[in-house]
Image: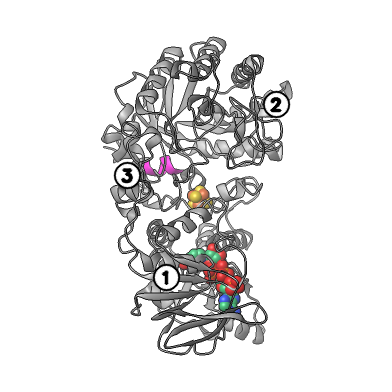
Amino acid sequence: MSHYPHLLAPLDLGFTTLKNRVLMGSMHTGLEETGDWNRVAEFYATRARGGVALMVTGGMAPNPEGGFLPGAAGLYTDTDIANHRIVTDRVHDAGGKIAMQILHAGRYAYGPKCVAPSAIKSPISPFPPQELGEDGIEKQINDIVTAATRARAAGYDGVEVMGSEGYFINQFLVTHTNKRTDRWGGSYENRMRLPVEIMRRVRAAVGADFIVIYRLSMIDLIPNGSTWEEVVQLAKAMEAAGASILNTGIGWHEARIPTIATSVPRRAFAWVTRKLMGEVSIPIITSNRINTPDVAEQVLAEGCADMVSMARPFLADPDFVAKAAAGKSAEIAPCIACNQACLDHTFSGKLSSCLVNPRACHETELRVAPATTRKTIAVIGAGPAGLSAALTAAERGHDVTLFDKSDRIGGQLNLAKQVPGKEEFWGLVDYYDTMVAKTGITLALGKVATPDDLAGFDEIIIATGVLPRDPGIPGQDGPNVVSYIDVLRGDVQVGEKVAIIGAGGIGFDVAEFLVTEHSPTDHLPDWLQEWGVGDPADVRGGLRTEGPQPDAPVRQVTLLQRKAEKLGKRLGKTTGWIHRAGLQMKNVQMIGGVNYDRIDAQGLHVSHGADRSDPKVIAADTIVLCAGQLPERSLADQLIAAGRTVHIIGGADVAAELDAKRAIDQGTRLAAAL
Ligand code: NAP
Ligand code: SF4
């Protein structure tokens, strides 16, 4: 019997059957905008082959004014239909099903022609929207219906009407953004007229045998959001208007509560979907921070939903469902919810990929084919760069030996996993352990590799990582100064008052580590309280009236940098604000534009500007150095001096702003080419 009886059970929709309960949720990857439809098709077909029951495409604009980003893909013309046909045919050949998401961004559309129920600018867009008149609303509805009929003509199995996340339809539903006094505003009946009209007309246009999903915002997480009563009323109206399935939307994009970041507990919002179960008779999908088959199975077994939506986990591993079905869950590359290569790319106008799987969205270009000649390959350093190189080389049939001076694999991932809110890194290291064992890589751990050890290898890959940079501050060799490595390893006692030198990713992580006693990521009620999330049945939009209520910080921490800019400015585009808000809630002082003058028993002496004005002492029992990294290349230098050819990757190659994304990408690409 399957380990996942609920997850792998088929779902009969009457006119068609989904082969299991897994939906690949919509993701905007940027692939469609490349114009390379073969590449788009391969992305989806790869995931169809991996066993997912139904996929939803990235949001397709029904018209130019509704496009989320300039040049956003849509389905406007017959040529577009032909392009989308390439995708749907390839997915069907692979045994999959695919629905197209229709996304009208309303006031979130990044352009001067954006439209909305009322002319209220969104806090996340520079463009004030134009208020729609009656004709304008009719046009938007017609364009959405036309997009649905074109989707059918293009061979899709269905559409998802995007009604959540604060987009156009959602903007009509709440008084926060809808101040209208005509038949589209005022009472809830009026405010929900738009989604009801859209659903009714879409269903009439596409016929009965076509999947129509409505993504319903079940907890808006904004002021004056929907009440639970309104959510239920809308759900029933959507069923009556012809929806086949309801999907869960959590939070508006402008909400100041994280909803999918790695620090959000797993399945953090399944309880919201569960409240709707029994209110309608069509299937309901739950979503957000579900990233393993076990969590998905549990959510279904507990009756929180009829299906689960996972999106990013299918970037990390397209074979998620097939591996779960084959009893190989430990071999699923886990999505760690970092957003670094997916959403951060999207919001920087770059093609998405995945930190743990650089092949995501690069299926046609980054191929891992069996090697023509089997080589012996030494990889020195079992951090993310070395691991990805070793695994890719082994997968291709090479004979790989992986050295590390530590007695375990993982490198700096073992530090990251100690940070509250980064618990997902445990699963990533576990995955690497599984795969190293499976691929038969020879491990040489607890061993400092020497040039002699590497004499007989055909290829040598140096992935020796980084060394902490010496900031050269007078007094830094005192007993009150420690490195971030000592702190995160728990090797040193840290005092009550702490100054952190350096506010990059590691400085922020160390601050989080030092102010937090118990990670709320491990305990949902604590996390909901920390961020002020309540039951939408008690408070509109699920925002507690008392606001965020974090635990008191366990230390008094000051985070410093020399640059005069806002601290954390260079953190991840979609997650930096969460790290900043988290530390602010814990009263961490953030000071930029300092000179580090000296350290003594009093603490850290700083001043400002070239004239070293405004000198002061940051009183601290412990000063933690997080001043960035330099490449560790001593072995590489020895080998090169001895005339050996080496490949240098990861932090050993370029340490500046090193992160696991670049390390894994570089390791994979090198090994794919050897
Ligand atoms: P970083 O992002 O390069 O930040 C280094 C910090 O040190 C900056 O705040 C910089 O600010 C300061 N600094 C640089 N030179 C200095 C000097 N000579 N004296 C004093 N301060 C100096 O590096 P990081 O924080 O070490 O993070 C490295 C990368 O790892 C990041 O890209 C991050 O995404 C990733 N990361 C890794 C982990 C992990 O556990 N391994 C955790 C989180 C993030 P000023 O120059 O303005 O002073
Ligand atoms: Fe998940 Fe990070 Fe990959 Fe995005 S980049 S899919 S969040 S692991």
Left or right of 289: which side holds 168? right
Q: Is residue 148 above or below residue 339?
A: above
Q: Classify 10 Å Cα crowding around label 1: few (below 14), some (14-19), many (20 and above).
A: many
Here the colouring is one colour
Left or right of 19: which side holds 63? right
Residue position marked by numbered label 1 in the rendering: 557
User: The magenta stretch spans which residues?
Assistant: 319-324
Instruction: Please tell me which residue lies in front, 662 or 519.
Output: 519
Most distant residue in the front direction? 614
For the stretch drawn in magenta, the main secondary structure is helix
> x, y percentage for residue 562?
60, 73
Q: Does the segment drawn in magenta span residue 321?
A: yes
Residue position marked by numbered label 2 in the rendering: 80
Q: Is residue 305 above or below residue 3?
A: above
Q: Classify 10 Å Cα crowding around label 2: few (below 14), some (14-19), many (20 and above).
A: some
Q: Amino acid at mark 3?
A: Asp
Q: Quadrant of the N terminus?
A: top left
Left or right of 653: which side holds 390? left
State yes or no: discs 3 and 2 in contact (Cβ < 8 Å): no
Q: Which mark is residue 642?
A: none
Instruction: Please tell me which residue lies in front, 522 or 536.
Output: 536
Earlier-in-chain disc, 3 versus 1? 3
Residue position marked by numbered label 3 in the rendering: 294
> What is the distance, in whole Å, between disc 3 and disc 2 at their CAs?
39 Å
Q: Quadrant of residue 639?
A: bottom right
**Mark 3 CB near ligand 2 (8 Å cut):** no
Q: Amino acid at mark 1?
A: Val
State yes or no: discs 1 and 2 in contact (Cβ < 8 Å): no
Instruction: Please tell me which residue lies in front, 461 or 255.
Output: 255
> x, y percentage for residue 39?
65, 40
Q: Amino acid at mark 2?
A: Asp
Q: Does the segment drawn in magenta span residue 310?
A: no
